[in-house]
Image: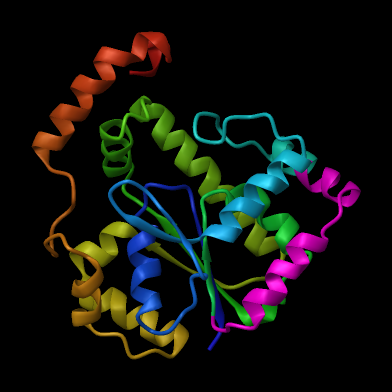
Amino acid sequence: MKNVIILTHGWTGSSVFAALLSKAGYWCGDNTFKKVDYDTYENLRLVELNNQLLKELDYTGNREHEILSSEVLDELARKASTIDLTPYREFLNECQQHKPWIWKDPRLALTIRIWAKLLPLDEVAFIVLTRDDEQAWITSNLRRHIQSYAFTRNYNGAITNSIKKFLNENHQEFIEFKFEDLQLTPEKTVEELNQLLDLRLTLDDLKSVYKFPLYKKTRGLKDKLTAWLIYLKNYRSRYDISNL
């Protein structure tokens, strides 16, 4: 079984995908990063090291509120030659003792080019995970990450494009899912995961980790209206009205 790295822009249901793969024996770490209301299934040490790596690379941007540019990624990759990668190599060696493992952390959109210098890429299956832009925008604002719909669309698109560029440049095959694939066509999506990774996951496995109804999107009209109210109340202090 290959290890798995999920590359995503965030708010994409990646925790559900990771939880599902953990059912098949993928190692998420001794400890995972837990939010107030759910487990992200992100290896806590990976999150810590990604934060440390960005600090060592002098990244001063706001990854959740700035459009990712190729210039930023090129600069981070250039600076990587000046830092000691020993702790990152040691972490990878630890993961290799627990194969198959799964990594997922939105910060990887910024750091995967550095990790690639250490990773045995031929032992990794890459999943590019996105989400319907409107669903992502609703979720973001409901969680008080205030942003315009235009920003959400451009932000998500820029990250997804940069991820695919990295994979293509490194001659890595990948499979792409939207979170809505798992929600609306769960049987088909689970089977595609099984075929990609040679697994035997079932719909019952999905139901055990995803507590919301299947065959429908998470966010409905009520959520959309609430998100608009939250955004309209807050946008003046963060975004220009032209983004509406």
The answer to which quarter of the image holds residue 145 is top left
Task: Name the residue at the right extreme.
Answer: 82
Q: Is residue 28 left or right of residue 37?
A: right
What residue do we see at 83% from left, 49% from top? 80
- Quarter holding the C terminus is top left
The main secondary structure of the magenta stretch is: helix
In the rendered view, tell whether residue 212 sits above or below residue 29: above
**Is residue 88 one of those drawn in magenta?**
yes
In front of the other: 42 or 12: 42
Residue 128 pos. (x, y %):
48, 61
Residue extent of the magenta highlight: 76-100
What residue do we see at 59% from left, 37% from top? 68
Q: Is residue 207 left or right of residue 130?
A: left
* Colour convention of the picture: rainbow
Q: Is residue 189 left or right of residue 68?
A: left
In front of the other: 197 or 96: 96
**Is residue 215 one of those drawn in magenta?**
no
What residue do we see at 82% from left, 58% from top? 85
In the rendered view, tell whether residue 96 sits above or below residue 48: below
The answer to which quarter of the image holds residue 72 is top right
Label total for image: 0
Residue 201 pos. (x, y %):
30, 85
In the rendered view, tell whether residue 54 sits above or below residue 81: above
Residue 1 pos. (x, y %):
53, 89
Residue 49 pos. (x, y %):
66, 54
What residue do we see at 18% from left, 45% from top? 219
